[in-house]
């Protein structure tokens, strides 16, 4: 066993100890004080061993990706790899979701009392709904919004309102939208890595982006959709910088603006964007005109919402109050500030733990190939964004879905690992165990 592999296993062992501590300490706190508001800490889940119609498909997708994923990713053309990765990611997410059955696993998830579909009928007049949006955020305000509606800017809710308007009504279509759009996030990350760190590393990362344990939650949460929008914003920024494309710059700005109106916490994606700018700075130096469409695109969505009467800053201020009015004000920061990291282990897997260990080594020792150090910078920016979200205290618990937009950028660290099939098998095993032993809340 090599020294690097031994250190990888030490890191995995430390992560396993963190998860065990989070489970044991969390159960003690929940049983004694009932302040965590989760049934299977640190995850919002219930212990419920089960199988379902998606079980055979999930196992087959896992076996096929472990056996052939690295070889296919290395040999097919780049243009073929992107749709293959998207299709495989969709197959993985859908099969995992269908372990709980088509209704329970997909259709009903976005129709619960906390979700966006509960307020579709309140947006018959969209401009009026936007003007009055902040008046319903606080818990004791008249007709207060459900938790997820109040907790996000209105672009999140408007997405499902518009789906309803075009005839794609109900939880089934909403779930299909989130999975179909959300799984394009892996393609966006591949595009960004190829532009900023080279095609070889992107190809090595592809199977890990497909077979991520995060798929357990990507099939049941609108955060998968948010993650994809944010990922495409960064990918287009990378393409704009390396390809000197004015169109990519404009589209990047447009999507960054939309990202900030889908989730307040996604403003932290600016840290990942900053890393992309640093890595692609030569493109901006050689063609400073890229800033014009970038800034113009960035202004579109905020301007549209401001003209409609929605005040982002006022809404965020009220959200902080609403957060502390509910479970967020009761959940103990002293537990969640480290237990959230155990949730991150669940969604990114043990291979990512080992990959992050190697990422840190590259940055500290300044060794390795230039492409690997560039990838390490991008991954480290995502980890920094995740830590900022953690320390803020505004994401205590439920981070298995809230942090999907950051987790997506940690997975490429697996491209630094040796023995990829072994690590892929570990990733798949974790996801299958989670989905068969627990019934997750999102």
Image (cartoon, helix red, strand yellow):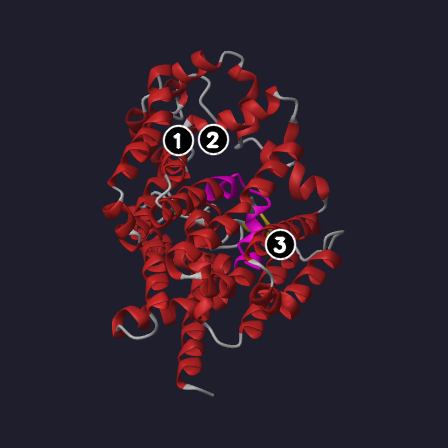
Q: Which residue is mark 1?
A: 261
Residue depicted at x 46% and y 52%: 191
366 or 346: nearer the viewer: 366
Q: CA distance from mark 1 to mark 3?
A: 30 Å
Whichever of labels 3 and 2 marks the residue nearer the N terminus, that label is 3
Secondary structure beneath dot 2 equals: helix
Q: Is residue 214 magenta?
A: yes
Viewer-closest of 231 and 132: 231
Q: Are marks 3 and 2 in contact (CB under 8 Å)?
A: no
Q: CA distance from mark 3 to mark 2?
A: 28 Å
Instruction: Give the x, y percent position of residue 142.
Output: 43, 16
Circle 2 sits on which residue? Answer: 156
Which element is circle 1 on?
loop
Left or right of 259 on screen, residue 214: right
Q: Which residues are magenta?
A: 209-227
Distance in Å between CA atoms under marks 2 and 1: 7 Å
Q: Pick the residue in front: 232 or 288.
A: 288
For image coordinates 56% across by 47% down, the residue present is 183
């Amino acid at each position: 066993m090599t020294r690097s592999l031994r250190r990888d296993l030490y890191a995995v062992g430390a992560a396993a100890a963190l998860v065990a501590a989070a489970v044991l300490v969390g159960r003690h706190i929940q049983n004694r004080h009932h302040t965590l508001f989760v049934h299977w800490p640190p995850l919002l889940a219930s212990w419920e061993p089960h199988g379902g119609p998606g079980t055979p498909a999930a196992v087959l997708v896992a076996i096929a990706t472990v056996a052939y994923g690295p070889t296919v990713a290395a040999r097919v053309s780049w243009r073929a790899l992107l749709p293959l990765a998207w299709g495989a990611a969709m197959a993985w997410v859908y099969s995992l979701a269908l372990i709980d059955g088509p209704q329970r696993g997909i259709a009903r998830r976005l129709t619960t009392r906390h979700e966006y579909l509960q307020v579709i009928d309140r947006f018959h007049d969209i401009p009026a709904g936007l003007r009055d949006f902040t008046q319903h955020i606080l818990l004791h305000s008249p007709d207060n919004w459900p938790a997820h509606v109040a907790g996000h800017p209105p672009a999140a809710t408007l997405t499902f309102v518009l789906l309803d308007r075009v005839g794609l009504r109900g939880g089934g279509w909403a779930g299909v939208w989130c999975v179909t759009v959300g799984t394009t996030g892996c393609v966006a990350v591949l595009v960004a890595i190829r532009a900023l760190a080279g095609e070889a590393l992107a190809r090595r990362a592809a199977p890990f982006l497909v077979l991520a344990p995060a798929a357990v939650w990507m099939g049941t949460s609108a955060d998968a959709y948010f993650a994809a929008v944010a990922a495409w914003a960064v990918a287009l920024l990378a393409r704009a910088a390396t390809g000197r494309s004015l169109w990519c710059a404009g589209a990047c700005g447009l999507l960054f603006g939309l990202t900030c109106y889908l989730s307040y916490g996604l403003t932290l994606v600016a840290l990942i964007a900053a890393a992309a700018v640093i890595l692609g700075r030569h493109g901006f130096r050689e063609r400073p005109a890229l800033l014009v469409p970038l800034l113009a695109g960035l202004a579109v969505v905020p301007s549209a919402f401001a003209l409609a009467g929605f005040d982002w800053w006022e809404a965020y201020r009220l959200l902080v109050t609403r957060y502390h009015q509910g479970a967020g004000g009761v959940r103990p920061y002293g537990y969640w500030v480290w237990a959230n990291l155990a949730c991150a282990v669940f969604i990114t897997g043990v291979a990512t733990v080992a990959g992050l260990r190697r990422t840190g080594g590259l940055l500290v020792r300044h060794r390795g190939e230039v492409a690997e150090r560039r990838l390490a910078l991008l991954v480290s920016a995502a980890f920094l964004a995740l830590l900022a979200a953690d320390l803020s205290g505004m994401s205590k618990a439920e981070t298995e879905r809230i942090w999907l937009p950051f987790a997506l950028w940690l997975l490429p660290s697996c491209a630094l690992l040796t023995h990829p099939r072994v690590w892929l098998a570990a990733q798949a095993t974790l996801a299958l165990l989670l989905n068969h032993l627990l019934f997750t809340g999102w």
